[in-house]
Image: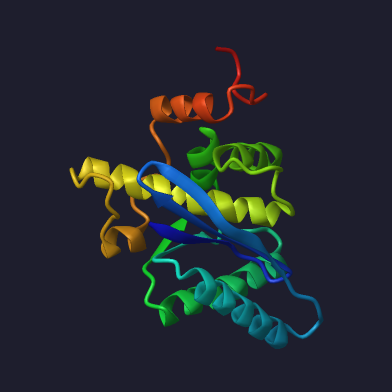
């Protein structure tokens, strides 16, 4: 499975393409699309063009995006919603089923807790994908986390349904069913293997 993960934003939109083959998970490409200016429409056009380039280059077969949540800052909520709409349009153009995850689901999937700080997410993403350094800016690390969340969610669904390591159905992907995380036992084992010296592991 090859998934495009998106952390939506108009000023900065994180993207990441992560692939799982057998038991190996690899980050094929990642980055952040930054747009500037007062006029929103040209920025949305630029974002769409950049995301189309990503899809054309990496040809993902799955799409996952962090779900828009209620934000006290109306302006921020509006721009995130606009960027999300562009990303969803790109997914629809390429026939990709969409899975959405809340911020807490993404955090729980990669760190084992839904209240993880940004630093922990970056640390775990770099450890799990064997990256040389923590991805920056945080939007990039978040997009990688979204992609990892979807891969593990898909694996858990397939295992639960007795389908082996296959992908979930389009209905399951679109619904983003379950809590998007791992069981506490699996998460603890994953964290221990991926980052045995992580300062966020807590006492043994």
Image vertical order of residue 88 relative to residue 135, above or below: below
Q: Position of residue 160 (x, y in %)?
A: 23, 41
Quarter of the figure with residue 43? bottom right
Q: Position of residue 140 (x, y in %)?
A: 66, 56
Image vertical order of residue 201 relative to residue 98, above or below: above
Image vertical order of residue 31 relative to residue 151, above or below: below
Q: Residue furthest top?
A: 204
Q: Residue at x 29, y 58 (%)?
A: 172
Coloration mode: rainbow
Give the left or right position of residue 33, taking residue 103 as reference: right
Quadrant location of the C terminus?
top right
Q: Position of residue 26 (x, y in %)?
A: 51, 49
Q: Residue at x 44, y 66 (%)?
A: 60
Q: Nearer the viewer, residue 53 or 172?
A: 53
Image vertical order of residue 97 relative to residue 158, above or below: below
Give the left or right position of residue 188, taking residue 53 as reference: left
Q: Residue at x 74, y 54 (%)?
A: 137
Q: Residue furthest right?
A: 37
Residue 96 visible at all: yes
Q: Residue at x 50, y 68 (%)?
A: 58
Quadrant location of the N terminus?
bottom left
What is the total number of numbered labels drawn onto the structure image?
Answer: 0
Residue 102 visible at all: no
Q: Position of residue 183 (x, y in %)?
A: 38, 32
């Amino acid at each position: 499975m090859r998934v495009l993960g998106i952390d939506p934003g108009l000023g900065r939109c994180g993207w990441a393409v992560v692939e799982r083959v057998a038991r190996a998970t690899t980050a094929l490409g990642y980055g952040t699309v930054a747009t500037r200016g007062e006029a929103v429409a040209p920025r949305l056009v630029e974002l769409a063009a950049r995301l189309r380039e990503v899809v054309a280059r990496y040809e993902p077969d799955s799409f996952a995006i962090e779900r828009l949540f209620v934000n006290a800052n109306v302006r921020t909520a509006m721009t995130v919603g606009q960027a999300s709409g562009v990303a969803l349009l790109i997914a629809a153009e390429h026939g990709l089923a969409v899975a959405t995850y809340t911020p807490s689901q993404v955090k729980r999937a990669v760190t084992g807790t839904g209240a993880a700080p940004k630093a922990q997410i970056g640390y775990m993403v770099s450890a799990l994908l064997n990256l040389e350094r923590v991805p920056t800016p945080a939007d990039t690390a978040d997009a990688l986390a979204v992609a990892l969340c979807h891969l593990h969610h898909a694996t858990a669904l397939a295992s639960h349904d007795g389908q082996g390591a296959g992908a979930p159905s389009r209905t399951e992907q679109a619904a983003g069913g379950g809590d998007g995380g791992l069981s506490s036992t699996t998460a603890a084992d994953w964290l221990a293997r991926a980052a045995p010296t992580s300062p966020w592991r807590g006492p043994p």
